[in-house]
Amino acid sequence: MAKKLGVLLAVLLVMTLVGPLQAQEPVTFIWGAYTNPVQLYSAVVTDGVSFFVLEQGCESLLAFDGATTNVIPSLATELTSNEDLTVWTAKLREGVTFHDGTPFNAEAVAFNFNVWRSTDHPLHFASQVYEYYEYMFDGFDDASLIQSIDIVDEYTVRFNLSRPYVQMPNTLAMPMFEIHSPAALEKYGEDYGTPTVGYVCTGPYKFVEWVTDDHVTQDLWDGYWGEIEGNVERIIQRVIPDNAARFAALQAGAIHGKENATPEEIALIEASDDLYYMLRPSLNVFYLAFNYRIKEFHDPLVRQAISLALNRQAYVDAFYVAAEVANTFLPPLMWGYNPDVPMPEYNPDKAVELLAQAGFPNGFSEVTVLPLDDAGNVMLDAEGEKVPLTLFWMPVTRPYNPDGEGIGQAMAADLAAIGINVQLENAGDWATYLDRRRKGDLIGLYQLGWTGDNGDPDNFSGYFFKNCNQPQEGYFNFPEICETLQQAGSLVSQADREPLYQQADAMLAETVGRITIAHSQVPLVFRSNVSGYIANPLGTELIRFVTVE
Amino acid sequence: MTRYIIRRILETLPVLIGASIVVFLLVHLIPGGPEVVLLGERGSEANVAELRTRLGLDRPLYEQYLIYVGNILRGDLGRSVAGNIPIADELRQRFPATVELSLVALTIAVVVGVPLGIISSVRRGSWIDTGTMLGSLVGVSMPIFWLGLLLLWIFGVALGWLPFIGRLSPNVEIQTITGLNMVDAVLTGNWSGLVDALKHLILPSVTLSTIPIAIIARITRSAMLEVLHMDYIRTARAKGLRERTVILGHALRNAMLPVVTVIGLQLGSLLAGAVLTETIFSWPGIGRWLFNSIQGRDYAIVQSVTLVITFIFVVVNLIVDLSYAWLNPRIRYE
């Protein structure tokens, strides 16, 4: 018996090393992802990993063009509005069907939007988070910006809004508003988008299989209405959580591409004939925020001194693969960017002078935390409590911040050089960090950033600084900035809005209300037999353009 | 014996209830919640509050606990907060992955560790003994992460001999019967699938086995050394029995009690998931799932999976306890 077992094991070992015979396989593009998709239903997810899959199989009414944030037709061939931008009419593409064979038409569009906007719709589940609908369209039900949707004819749909909404074309191009098959939504109910069901849409690749924490497979669909420029017949997104293992998989040829690379990996890629990388255009900002419960931060001289002490270019050179120092909150790619705002200066000597003028000739290590009144506003005239100054670093890697701790240490060293001694603190994991930031509990200086969702500046500067009465975070309260942004958000023409965003950014830079650090470009790495990948600043990247040789 | 088993099974109930309360309280005590993670940088006070309400997280803790317990008693493990995925479905998929990896790793550990411990004890003070003990010290001390990446790079990238991502290669399929790929491949006669599954198991299981090998070798050695000094071993030798019979037939069986205990504990730990090994080798097991769920504050997953792991621990402990009686007939359970 033991001998037989031994022989079996020996045979297995030989077979293992020799390997199985390979069958004829479809042209496959394998993408290495750091984690699992959350769900394959566009309306309820926000993460890039889910959208990498969804964008290959699902489509919005409009789309972002190639490497830009310009909006082009997709499932809608035309989008027009009335004069005050409160009624938007979409002409839909004819002859399109969903993967399940049901027709795409005005009814399907209205059905999808009604599910998202109406909390009493039987398919609007309380357990699901329709985060982007709420965020982009003001809320649900009566609060929803979309008050009603009219089916004008089989291929025309009309959105009636409660207020002018200039972002409508950009918003309808967002992948969060991809149109899914009403029949499939009804058939699967709450299970729609889960691994056993996947998605049913109109895009070039249909869902085949999702083995959680392992892979998602999508196959080319022969019923697609559009052109397939590349040759990929199958897409597999493999989950490889460890960064080093993901790079090793790329080196070994086990995957064709992946997002992100460390500077060390970039050096290896540049030395390799088998690998290459491209940069995703930047639509983000990394910043250091002041928590305005600290009395000293209300002094512009102190804020300017801190800004002057930070060697942003050194952070960019040391920690990023590709980034540029941020002169403004808006990145250069976004309209509304102000190129006339000077680059932030690194000048420790001047910083020391400003600190002295502010009454801190020897710098400081402690700061005064002001109390809040019953309404939650900072009591500027109160005495406050002395606490050590803390700099909170981000506990996760984000596209805009590749190394929160490393950059935090560099910032602390720069501040120490002008006499400002900070305690570096890890505020906990990401959930804890976000929770404390939301509650205003990151009392000190703290790192954070933003990545644009749809290419409109109202979704960037507007999100943070537009609300005068309820600051988004850190008790930020600069009335001139918020009033300017409110005005920009209320206008209809881009030409009228653009100077206002530029003006707001100039004010933010001048007052140093928040310290902008960098706009980063995320590297995308590929095997050399892959071509045709188009990096998009919003991350909407389509494998139908890709060729694998 | 039967009464003992029934009593032990009944005793698991308070353990499970206690564990469920402790885990429930712990996950709710950690700052942040699933609503904060889900909303990320976009989480303002207003939308976080609204999401808390939608997810039922604004209800009193005791109410949430009772709902959770009620669902468990109805056999409903719930759905993940992020992704809305039925937890029972996930568990059915991930648990076999963990079991397969754990059993192979433990088999390697026993097959290597026990003989090494025996040889070390018999050849005490020899270079084999010194080497084994030094090796086991290195095995225990070596960071799994480092070893895994080293093996991955040598055998996966440099030599290209072995795959190191997940359980199967792309485009290779094995029909699911038990969820254990190797077993299913044999049952369905899918030999190329079997080879592929085996190949994928080698690097993670070898990595995962290093610490158990070291522990088992050390425990076996010390247990054997103790037994080898017993009178009955001297008597066996005096009777003229072959040394092989003395060692394997008389000494080893009596020395196995602590070894079996350690093997049981190791199995329990392995079945609870191996976060690092699963992360390096992209193994879709329950360890990484649980870890990610804690990070994402996915309360439903953390609570349900912890409860399942607790149950596994209890069952493994029970099996270990029962095996004592088989190994040493003088032990009786009443």
Image (tube, rainbow, N blue to C red):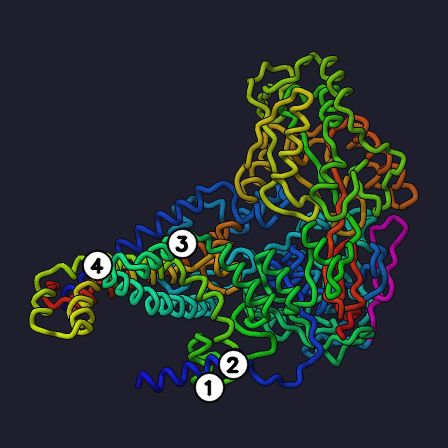
Residue drawn 17% across the image and 74% down it: B245
Q: Which residue is mark 4?
A: B223
Q: Is residue B36 above or below residue A345?
A: below
Q: How many marks?
A: 4
SS for tag 4?
Answer: helix
Within-10-Å neighbours for mark 3: few <14, some 14–19, many 20+: some
Position of A64 compared to A289: left or right? Answer: right
Residue type indicated by callout 4: Ala
SS for tag 1?
Answer: loop
Q: Which residue is mark 2?
A: B193
Within-10-Å neighbours for mark 2: few <14, some 14–19, many 20+: many
Q: Is residue A142 visible?
A: no
Residue drawn 56% across the image and 72% down it: B161
Q: Position of residue B310 (x, y in %)?
A: 34, 57
Give me the disc on residue B188. Answer: 1
Q: Which residue is mark 3?
A: B138
Residue B270: say if magenta: no
Return the disc, 2 or 3, that comes first in the chain's sequence. Answer: 3
